[in-house]
Image: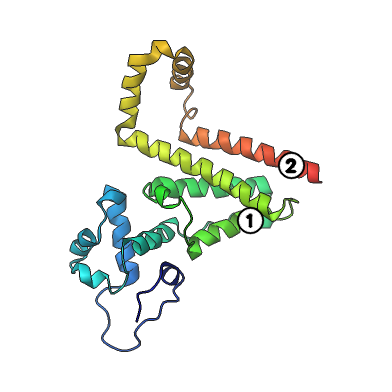
Amino acid sequence: MPPPTTVELLWGTAQRPKRGPKPALTLDGIVAEAIVLADAEGLSALSMQRLAQRLGFTKMSLYRYVPGKEQLTALMLDAAMGEPPDIGGGQRNWRVALRAWVEAIFDRYRAHPWAIELTLGVRPFGPNEMGWTEAALAAQAGTGLSGSEKLDAIVLLNGHARNLAQQVASMTDGGEQQFTEMMVAAADRYPQVRAAFAEEAVAPAGKGGPDDALRFGVDRILDGLAVLIDQRS
């Protein structure tokens, strides 16, 4: 029997033995432990050998459930993103629903920073990721936007959330100290940059942080969509 493909594993269509003893491992258990490892140490620390050691099995044991790291990370991404929240879809104002969608996906990216790089490029979607797309499309029902425009809007909103989450993750990994040192060394050459960051540093509590940056970008994207929707109506 050939090893299952990524799509078969994601969508649960891979053929499984119907007889034999109860397996000591489960695919869900393997994926869950891989997520714990990636959350703690990053995706670079993940290997089939390291994962097998954490589970107390041999690396060859894992290959009975998942052919390799490519399939494993695809399963990890879909599991980490989870099912989308109930944002109301067409039952709520499209702006309110899309804002709730972006805030939720931003939280998922922040909880699992390693997932950000896995969302890039052409790849098969799992049921959870497809569910997020379905929810965002449902939020735009009745807006008059075409299917391609709705999908482009999702790309814009998701890209903003993903890029900001990646920036926040880099700052928490020591990037903030490096940026501060760089600004001290080169601030005189870039007066506008220095002034902008100095103003952000003294912003009132609750202003200037990641959540505020998320809201600002989302508002600007939604404002642009509102203009297009008004033109269509």
> Residue, x 41% and y 52% (percent of image)?
118
- Above or below 47: residue 168: above
The residue identified by callout 1 is: 137
Query: Dot 2 surroundings within 10 Å: few (below 14), some, or many (20 or more)?
Result: some
Q: Is residue 141 visible?
A: yes
**Could you say which is closer to the camera, residue 15 or residue 19?**
15
Identify the residue at image location x=72%, y=53%.
146
Image height check: is 41 above or below 192? below
**Residue sitting nearer the eye, 101 or 1:** 1
Q: Quadrant of residue 179?
A: top left
In the picture of the structure, the residue carrying the numbered disc 2 is 228
Relative height, residue 228 to residue 38 (above, below): above
Farthest residue to the front: give it: 2
Q: Which mark is residue 147?
A: none
Give the residue at x 37% y 64%.
Answer: 71
Residue 231, percent from left and from top: 79, 41
Left or right? Give the position of 150 relative to 165: right
Disc 2 element: helix
For the image, the number of numbered tags is 2
Taking the spot 33% from the left edge, 15% from the top edge, the residue there is: 185
**Residue 146 left/right relative to 47:** right
Tell me the CA gap for discs 2 and 1.
16 Å
Left or right: 231, with 181 as reference point? right
* Percent coordinates x, y for residue 142 in the rendering: 74, 54
Q: Look at the numbered disc 1 and give the secondary structure of its residue.
A: helix
Q: Position of residue 110 (x, y in %)?
A: 41, 45
Badge 1 density bin: few <14, some 14–19, many ≥20, Cα 10 Å: some
Nearer to the camera, 54 or 145: 145
